[in-house]
Amino acid sequence: MHSEAHLTVVGPLASGPALLRSRPKIEDYRFARDRRVLRQRNLKASIKHEKMEERGMRLAKLSVVAAVIFTILMGGLFVGCSGGGAEVKQSNTTLGQELTDLQAAYDRGIITQREYEKAKKEILDRYK
């Protein structure tokens, strides 16, 4: 939709080839203005898109943090629901081994006679 540009001769005609320069028309200015407007709109749209991506990333991070907090809280709540406080004792040593270890501690002087008798009674009560 561009119309023909008017040509003007510049320089002396007799001294060599004439330089031709086109004079811009109003349509050319409008076309250039429209291109600038489109570039500005594209730039604004690009900035808007980047801001939306940043918001999306913040929302994703917030969701992960909320899920971790929820998991920790729920785990803490269910820890108390583990069987009514019953004690479970498991021993891999035998009665004889415990009594032998106790006797060795007494012989080395690590425990007193009173501590030895008390510990021996507790061990025997445990295995009844």
Image (cartoon, rainbow, N blue to C red):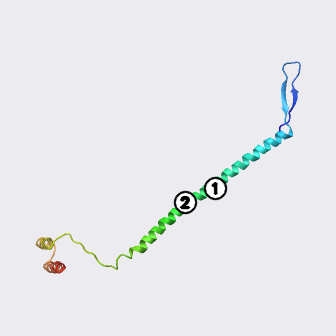
Which comes before the other along the chain, label 2 or label 1? 1
Name the kind of residue labelled 1 in the image. Answer: Lys
Residue sitting farthest toward the front: 1
Q: Quadrant of the C terminus?
A: bottom left
Q: x%, y% of residue 27?
A: 84, 40
Residue at the image position 76 percent from the left and 45 percent from the top: 36
Please state which amino acid type lies under the numbered disc 2. Ala
Question: Mark on residue 60?
Answer: 2
Q: Are marks 2 and 1 in contact (CB under 8 Å)?
A: no
Q: Residue 57: x percent and y percent?
A: 57, 57
- Badge 1: how crowded within 10 Å, few (<14), some, or many (20+)? few
Residue 58 x %, y %: 57, 59
Is 32 rendered above or below residue 98?
above
Q: Quadrant of residue 56?
A: bottom right
Q: Residues within 10 Å of mark 2 (few under 14, many from 20)?
A: few
* Element at label 2: helix
Reading the image, the residue beneath label 1 is 51
Image-based side of 67 in relation to 124, left or right: right
